[in-house]
Image (tube, rainbow, N blue to C red):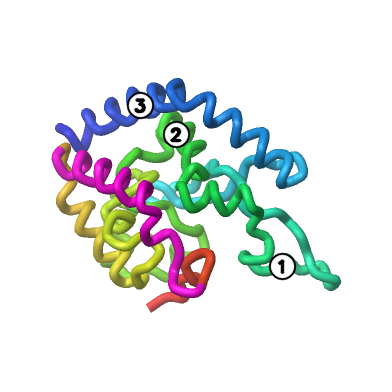
Amino acid sequence: MYRVFVKRVFDFILALTGLLIISPVFIVFFIALAIANEGKPFFLQRRPGKNGKVFKIIKFKTMNDKKDSNGNLLSDAERLTAVGSFVRKTSVDEIPQLINVLKGDMSLIGPRPLLVQYLPLYNEHQARRHEVRPGITGWAQVNGRNAISWNQKFDYDVWYVENISFILDCKIFFLTAKKVFIREGVSADGHVTIEPFKGN
């Protein structure tokens, strides 16, 4: 019952309440990032959701679009703005995903939605992460986030799929709050973000 119906009801109510409560913060960072990114406060990207159905994820844009003399984007580290760095470290960039939750694309808790190009790279076990709606945070995020290997991340995702419960979601919610507070596991060692998944 929880997995099929109650979880979605909780997602909608909590996402709507959350957006209303943090709307002042939302507006402040919307303005700051619009200035830092030349009028582009949001980052939109196609991501696979439940059963691999593709949707557009909404996040605050933490990196600008600066390019080198050949027209290629600079590295992530070079494009990460000062306000973007703060937004990333505090996980404020995830706030707009509450809109995705309201729309039903995502859940508050679930495997993180990754890149569309990773879909054909998963093995049968790893692909099970798409049996549920992706989440803003999840079991992998509270067990290392970007500081763990891809295999570890996928194992945590599938474990969550097999063990979804109200108690587990509550545990992940409070552990996420702790992780955000101490800013743990935001980046992989030596990188602004985790390195791309290249298959098994």
| Residue matched to label 3 | 12
Give the image location of residue 179, x and y in percent: 33, 51
Determine the CA span between mark 2 and mark 3: 9 Å
Is disc 1 placed on a helix, strand or loop? loop
Tell me the residue at 35%/26% (across/down). 12
Residue 141, image x and y in percent?
33, 55
Q: Main secondary structure of the magenta part?
A: helix
Q: Nearer the viewer, mark 1 or mark 2?
A: 1
> For the residue labelled by badge 2, is the local secondary structure a helix, a strand or a loop?
helix
Residue at the spot 17% in from the left edge and 34% down from the top edge: 2
Q: Residue 128: name its quadrant.
A: bottom left
Sequence-earlier tag: 2 or 3? 3
Marks 1/2: CA–CA distance: 30 Å
Inspect the image, locate mark 3, and give the three-letter code of the amino acid beneath it. Answer: Phe
Q: Quadrant of residue 145?
A: bottom left
Task: Say what amino acid the circle numbered 2 marks.
Answer: Leu
Q: Between disc 1 and disc 2, whose residue precedes? A: 1
Dot label at residue 74? 1
Q: Residue at x 42, y 29 (%)?
A: 102
